[in-house]
């Protein structure tokens, strides 16, 4: 599935302000660098997932410092290449929360864009990094939710948990 997961679920942007011009609400950012660019453009995502890494290297202090400290922070465990119940439960709760939330992932948040698309309401935006290209903007609707769900269903694991994510 590695090849399929490399295909972006939406258009790729290199300019955060242009991306924000078309972004819906809530805004979910997956990744430290993506969150940094949105914050630098003046917008704190409703939900941000960060792990302190980019391309398996520790992010610069400037990027770490840009992630807002003025929001609710929740620490979750999610080893590389997995999606734990801890992460999924916290993601759903954060999307439903009235306040902005940063999910600090101990492990890796790379796959979290897929359940974020499934869990987010129609009209939401999920933004994640496309290595060496930019930021992928996913405008959540039934079609893209079905695509993300299909990818998740083909992974090993508890597929029945997807029903708890999809609240449409």
Image: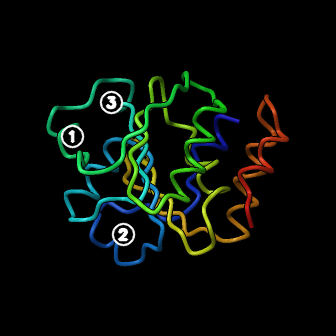
Q: Quadrant of the C terminus?
A: bottom right
Q: Nearer the viewer, residue 139 or 158?
A: 158
Q: Where 124 sits versus 62, above or below?
A: below
| Quarter of the rendering containing residue 22 | bottom left
Return the disc, 1 or 3, that comes first in the chain's sequence. 3
Left or right for 43, reference 92: left
Please, what secondary structure does the residue beneath circle 1 have?
Answer: helix
Q: Where residue 31 sits in the image (x, y, percent)? A: 40, 42
Give the number of the mark in front: 1 or 2.
Answer: 1
- Mark drawn on residue 163: none
Residue on which disc 3 sits: 52
Residue that appears at 54% across and 23% down: 80
Q: Could you tell me which secondary element the residue under label 2 belongs to? A: helix
Mark 2 or 3: the one toward you: 3
Q: Nearer the viewer, residue 47 or 155?
A: 47
Q: Residue at x 19, y 57 (%)?
A: 40
Q: CA distance from mark 1 to mark 3?
A: 9 Å
The disc placed on residue 63 is: 1
Mark 2 highlights which residue?
Answer: 19
Task: Give the vertical position of 36 relative to 142 (above or below).
Answer: above
**Could you say whether the residue bearing mark 3 is in a helix, strand or loop?**
loop
Task: Farthest residue to the left: give it.
Answer: 62
């Amino acid at each position: 599935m590695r090849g399929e997961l490399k295909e972006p679920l939406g258009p790729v942007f290199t300019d955060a302000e242009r991306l924000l011009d078309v972004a819906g609400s809530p805004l979910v950012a997956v990744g430290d660098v993506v969150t940094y660019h949105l914050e630098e453009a003046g917008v704190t995502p409703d939900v941000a997932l960060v792990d302190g890494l980019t391309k398996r290297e520790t992010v610069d202090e400037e990027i770490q410092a840009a992630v807002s400290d003025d929001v609710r922070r929740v620490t979750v465990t999610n080893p590389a290449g997995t999606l734990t119940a801890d992460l999924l439960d916290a993601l759903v709760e954060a999307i439903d929360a009235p306040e902005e939330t940063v999910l600090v992932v101990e492990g890796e948040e790379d796959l979290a864009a897929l359940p974020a698309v499934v869990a987010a309401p129609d009209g939401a935006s999920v933004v994640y990094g496309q290595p060496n290209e930019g930021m992928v903007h996913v405008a959540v609707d039934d079609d893209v939710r079905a695509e993300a769900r299909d990818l998740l269903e083909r992974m090993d694991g508890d597929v029945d948990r997807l029903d708890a994510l999809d609240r449409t």
